[in-house]
Amino acid sequence: MKRTGLSLRQKTTLAQQLLEDYEEKLVQFHRFVINLRKEHKYPLHVIANMDETPLTFDMPPDRTIHNTGEKTIKIRTMGNKKNCVTVVLTCAGDGSKLRPMVIFKRKTLPKVANKHGIVVAAQEKGWMDTEGMKLWIDKVWHVRCGGLERRRSLLVFDSFEAHMTDRVKRALECENMNLAVIPGGLTSILQPLDVSLNKPFKDGVRKR
């Protein structure tokens, strides 16, 4: 490889551009969460982060052998990279993980052998919407360990439109939940699932 000018290269991607005032927004978000924790003294197991991540049917590797020094790296795929499901993952402050939820791109629920208690949903575009959020609250958050007590809790998520509808907010209020909404453009820094869990999750699926 050295003789012919080849090396192991990473696929090039478009990086998320941070806001000009991102440091100020970071401090404001941290201060907001710290003040909530001081006021309510949440146990770690009721502080949670949830996030949706696409899972494609074609998961090509990010690395390939290519010419050393080349600035644009392309990787061949099987053509199914746009065919995907949405996976909803949730983790708590004590390190525990809640039931995953999978949203299929279809109008009716698929007939799958659901042996592991995964919450399965269907949506015409395969996205999270208000109905999906209501299902997540009922089937994931409410049935977690201690969920029936409706103890004061804190949910951290991004400002995705489906998270912020009036119906979703009312349902979360019924669960006695405070919300910490991550400012737009800062999920790559502030969202624990984005920072440390989504990649190893997808690596595990690719390996399987």
Image (tube, grey):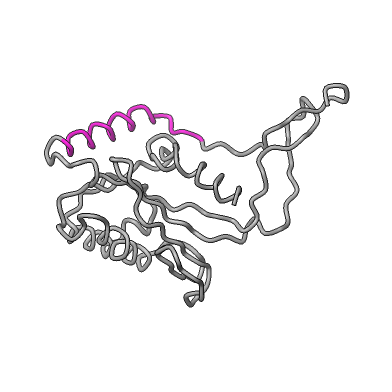
- Determine whether, in the image, residue 175 is placed left or right of residue 79: left
Residue 171: quarter of image? bottom left
Which percent across, then down, holds residue 71? 73, 30
- Determine whether, in the image, residue 36 is placed left or right of residue 8: left
Magenta residues, dominant SS class: helix
Segment colored magenta: 17-37
Q: Residue at x 42, y 55 (%)?
A: 88
- Determine whether, in the image, residue 4 is placed left or right of residue 201: right
Which percent across, then down, holds residue 195? 44, 37
Residue 175: quarter of image? bottom left
Which percent across, then down, holds residue 70? 77, 29
Magenta stretch: includes residue 167: no
Residue lying farthest front?
115
Residue lying farthest right?
4
Instruction: Work out whether residue 145 or residue 84 is closer to the camera in this orientation and state it.
Output: 145
Q: Residue at x 73, y 44 (%)?
A: 75
Instruction: Work out whether residue 128 or residue 19 is closer to the camera in this orientation and state it.
Output: 128
Which percent across, then down, holds residue 177? 20, 52
Residue 120: quarter of image? bottom left
The vertical placement of 186 against 4, above or below, is below
Q: The N terminus appears in which quarter of the rendering?
A: top right
